[in-house]
Image (cartoon, grey):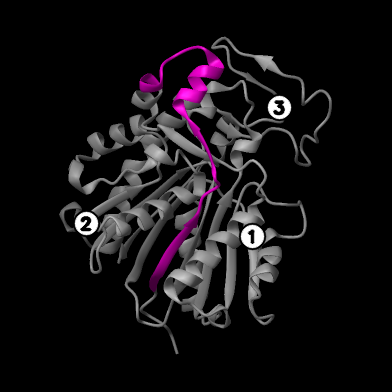
Amino acid sequence: MRVTNIGIAGVACYLPEECLCNEKLVEEFGTWTSEKIYHKTGIRERRIAKKELVSDMATGAAENLFERYHISREEIDMLILCTETPDYLMPATACIVHDRLGLKKNSGAFDYNLGCSGYVYGLALAKSLIAGNMACNVLLITADVLTRFINPGDKSTRTIFGDAATATLVTGSGSSGSIGEFVMGTDGSGAPNLIIPAGGMAMPRSADTAAERKNRFGNIRSKDNFYMNGPEVLQFSMREVPVAVNDVLEKNGIGMDNVDLFIFHQATRLMLEHLRTELEIPVEKFYMNMEKLGNTVSSTIPLALEQAEREGILEKGKKVMLVGFGVGYSWGATIIDW
């Protein structure tokens, strides 16, 4: 029997204990001020995973989900884990998390590698698995320790990124809201603009890749570190996101006025304000929560969902647009009824 009502039954998160505030960054770099960093990024502090692995944070987020929503692990038919910083090249981190959570052995588990669009893609995967009668309840986890790949001397990225994990239960039980139609896109020509160059088969780590260089802005990094071309990423976002927004509205047969809340990937406040202005979205409908979390890559959207619900902004029956965009380049959007 084909399942038609597939929705999100709950979202929970895990945050590392260590907090890196703007004042600490100013102290380290001796430039800027904490308010200038906040003005440029919309971020005052971010969480840093000093010791935790992705499997640690993913397990923590899932346990929080089970406890908060009284979910039995026996109900989970599939675990899918979005990460760009897995514990190992092999096996899949999802298999490790599956074991640590004590999930039943006749349930599947796999990783997929995506960044800022990862949560939207994960919802599409989960919905497809349920619609195809492969599962009834899918545990979707996002987790990354990207800050471990950021050079301590690279103030352009240290001010922006943080670490986190989230867990979402997607179900076809009919007891939750619904997930609508999706639009997705890819432009691999943008791959060099958000990248960790070394560490894979194309460029194994070596003494050469570990050699640090300082750019004209004073930022230090090596090929082992994360690199972001900010101006190019902003141009990509302004080019593709408005098109994706209009396409997802059309695909779901609704207009902008029908959307109660817009939750975009929490990149930086500057980028989101540019997009909000371009799309003429009212301030009260545009949710931002990166101030105390930073940009947590694939976890930003579910963190925003979880926080908006706790704040009473996201209530049952509200229609929400989710838009993820970034590494790849990759983007995706959907409409959910909460």
* Pointer 1 or 3: first along the chain: 1
Please identify the quadrant where the N terminus is shown.
bottom left
Question: Real-space Cα distance between discs 3 and 2?
Answer: 42 Å
Mark 3 and 2 residues: CB-CB less than 8 Å, in contact? Answer: no
Horizontal relation, residue 27 to residue 317: left or right? right
Q: Which residues are magenta?
A: 7-36
Label 1 element class = strand
Mark 1 and 3 residues: CB-CB less than 8 Å, in contact? Answer: no
Residue 206: where, in percent of width, then height? 83, 29
Horizontal relation, residue 293 to residue 141: left or right? left
Q: Which residue is mark 1?
A: 111
Residue 60: where, in percent of width, then height? 57, 60
Residue in view at x 55 percent, y 47 percent: 16
Mark 1 and 2 residues: CB-CB less than 8 Å, in contact? Answer: no
Residue 45: where, in percent of width, then height? 44, 34
Residue in view at x 56 percent, y 78 percent: 73
Question: Looking at the image, which residue sits at the far right?
Answer: 207
Residue type, label 2: Val
Q: Which residue is mark 3?
A: 223
Residue type, label 3: Lys
- Quarter occupied by residue 336: bottom left
Residue 115: where, in percent of width, then height? 54, 46
From what the image shows, is residue 211 above or below residue 241?
above
* Pointer 1 or 2: first along the chain: 1
Question: Real-space Cα distance between discs 1 and 3?
Answer: 25 Å
**Pointer 3 local density, CA inside 10 Å: few below 14, some 14–19, many at least 20:** many
Residue in view at x 37 percent, y 37 percent: 291
Residue type, label 1: Asp
Label 2 element class = loop
Q: Which residue is mark 2?
A: 259
**Pointer 1 local density, CA inside 10 Å: few below 14, some 14–19, many at least 20:** some
Give yes or no for residue 21 being in the magenta stretch. Answer: yes
